[in-house]
Image (spheres, grey):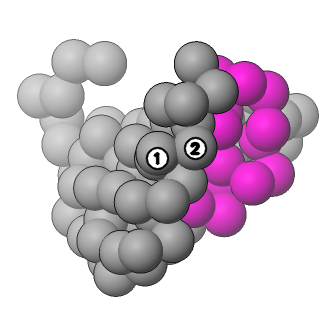
Amino acid sequence: PEEGLRLLRRAAEARPDDAQSQHWYANVLGTRGQYAKAIRHYARARALNPGAAAILADEAYYVYAAGDRVRGLRMLDQVLALHPTLAS
């Protein structure tokens, strides 16, 4: 697990303008409970690929998990409004 985290961190650092690298790294950080850091990488990924429903949905989940339930639910409402057929 630590090696995977290290490799994803390296990928995110080497490719700061790659939404997928930022998204994947954020996913791992979030599952490890590093919410603030994960949310920063989700925000970066979303800025790079603003139409990606998966990025917004994942970010909303971790915003909610980090304790900002109102904002997390608002973000999930945004996902549903933009992508009504998305099943997450």
Residue shown at 29% from the left, 71% from the top: 18
Cβ atoms at labels 2 and 1 below 8 Å apart: yes
Tell me, for residue 8, which label it has, or none. 1
Left or right of residue 48: residue 67:
right
- Can residue 50 be seen in this snapshot? no
Residue shown at 28% from the left, 56% from the top: 20
Percent x, y of residue 66: 83, 35
Exactly how many numbered labels are in the figure? 2
Residue 6 inside the magenta-drawn segment: no
Left or right of residue 87: residue 80:
right
36 and 11: which one is in front? 11
Q: Which residues are magenta?
A: 29-41
Vertical arrangement, residue 64 with respect to residue 22, above or below: above
Q: Residue furthest front?
A: 3
What is the distance, in whole Å, between disc 2 and disc 1 at their CAs?
6 Å
In which image quadrant can residue 11 be found? bottom left
Percent x, y of residue 34: 79, 38
Q: Main secondary structure of the magenta part?
A: helix
Q: Residues within 10 Å of mark 2 (few under 14, many from 20)?
A: few
